[in-house]
Amino acid sequence: MPNIKQQEKRVRIATRERLQNLRYRSTVKTLTKRLQVAVTEGDAAKVSAEHVELVRWIDKAASKGALHKNTAARKKSQAARLVSGS
């Protein structure tokens, strides 16, 4: 347990940031699964919309530090490959 007031504050901040990072990573996973479902269904409009939203969330997560920039680039590349059908 922290003994100093600043340590207590850092524990609170770290908890809040950890949960925020978890929300970003979880949303990226959910949107990836939605994109895969849309690709298997073959609905081009839905695939395009899901891909745009996924890329937006990946960029947002990387800018906030929830994802490493190389991880974000890899996930975007995988999504693009999925959309293109290769």
Image (tube, grey):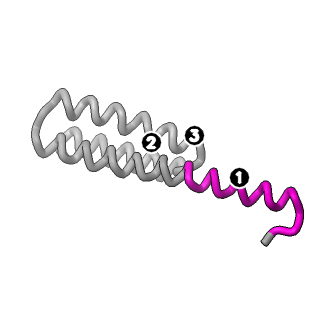
Q: Secondary structure at mark 3?
A: helix
Amino acid on which the number 2 mark rests in the picture: Ile
For the residues carrying marks 1 and 3, which lies nearer the camera in this image?
A: 1
Q: Which residue occupies the extreme bottom position in the image?
A: 1
Q: Position of residue 64 (x, y in %)?
A: 59, 42
- Stretch in magenta: 2-20
Residue on which disc 2 sits: 58
Q: CA distance from mark 1 to mark 3?
A: 18 Å
> Which quadrant does the N terminus fall into?
bottom right
Residue 33 placed where, x, y %? 27, 49
Dot 3 or dot 2: first in sequence order is: 2
> How dense is the environment of label 2, judged by Cα within 10 Å: few (below 14), some, or many (20 and up)?
many
Q: Which mark is residue 13?
A: 1
In this view, the mark in front (1 or 2): 1
* In this picture, residue 55 sits left or right of residue 70: left
Q: Amino acid at mark 3?
A: Ser
Where is residue 50 shown, x and y percent of the image? 28, 35
Q: Residue 61: x, y in percent?
A: 51, 43
Q: Is residue 9 magenta?
A: yes
* Residue for badge 3: 63
Compared to residue 2, the image places residue 69 above or below, namely above
| Distance in Å between CA atoms under marks 3 and 2 | 9 Å
Tag 1 secondary structure: helix
At x 51% / y 38%, what residue is drawn? 60
Please state which of residues 23 and 86 is positioned toward the viewer in this rendering: 23
Rendered view: 86 above or below 42:
below
Dot 1 surroundings within 10 Å: few (below 14), some, or many (20 or more)?
Answer: few
Residue drawn 42% across the image and 52% down it: 26
Q: Residue at x 10, y 41 (%)?
A: 41
Of all residues shown, which one is farthest toward the top?
45
Q: Amino acid at mark 1?
A: Ile
Counting residues from the start of the chain, the first of labels 1 and 3 encountered is 1
